[in-house]
Amino acid sequence: MYLGAGSVTLTTRVATVTYRVEKSDLDSVASLVARAMARYPVFTYVIPDDASCSGGTSARLPREDKLRSVLRFILGIAALQGEIVAPSRGIEAVAVWVRSENMRLATTEILRAGFATLPLKIGLPATKRLLGVGRSKHRKRAQLLTGRYYLLDMLSVDPKQQNKGYGRLLLESKLQDIDRECARCYLETSDARNIEYYQRFGFELVHQYRIARVPVFCLLRPQSTPQILTDARGINLQDA
């Protein structure tokens, strides 16, 4: 790994992510993320602890079921927009990557992802909060970013699999590809404790704002110029 001025360029090969999550996996992936991010600030805003007080059919569902429904919808959108990857078929962790040009979906595609039944599962107030979060993020991205970039929309590790390097594997594997394209990468987090972690991979804090009471930290990994390693004869060692 090369540490440059304000950026990190990966120059050593890292292990390849071996499994692209399929539609049949999405229910189990939603459960994994719900366990891992149960107290994530954005999700506690969308589905608060007192969500059962909202009334209607959804009031009978516990918060964890509602959170799974939210995440199943988000992952359904992600599967249409970009790619969801895991280290293996065991799905120890997941990362969601989306190209900026693929972020807008037609109404029919949003309905296919499960939006039509979402208010019945989580309640209308929670659905409105979720839509508000999405609109706020889209507006802010349009203000901060122009041109093409990759969005790291989610990185989540199963609590039983944490501290085993799976998050690093998912990041480094994709960032290596992004560096080959000389592209930028952007992400948002509402947990300030995550900032230092992402900075290790070359992300820089470029902006912060709030959605209702929830802080949102915007991080950008600048476009990198890949380092070309050659031997004395001028042969590219990375392709050797």
Image (tube, rainbow, N blue to C red):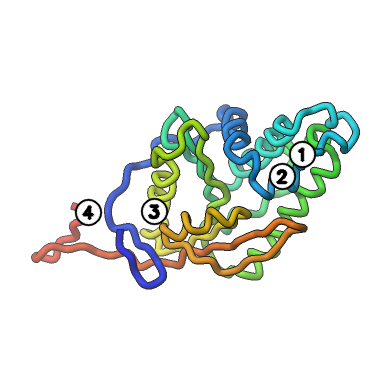
* Quarter of the figure with the N terminus: bottom left
Q: Residues within 10 Å of mark 1 (few under 14, many from 20)?
A: few
Q: Residue at x 70, y 32 (%)?
A: 64
Q: Position of residue 14 (x, y in %)?
A: 31, 47
Q: Residues within 10 Å of mark 2 (few under 14, many from 20)?
A: some
Q: Residues within 10 Å of mark 3 (few under 14, many from 20)?
A: few
Tag 4 residue: 239
* The disc label shown at residue 49, or none: 1
Residue 19's tag is none
Which marked residue is nearer to the observer: mark 3 or mark 2? 2
| Residue type for callout 3 | Asp
Q: Earlier in the sequence, mark 1 or mark 3?
A: 1
Left-right relation of 169 to 114: left
**Is 71 positioned to the left or the right of 150 in the image?**
right
Q: Which residue is mark 2?
A: 44
Residue 218 shows in the view: yes
- As helix, strand or loop, the secondary structure at mark 4 comes to helix
Give the amino acid type for the residue marked by disc 4 in the picture.
Asp
Question: Up-down: is 177 above or below 140?
Answer: above
The answer to whether one can see residue 99 in this image is no
Residue 81: image location, x then y, percent: 60, 47
- Name the N-terminal-most of marks 1 and 2: 2
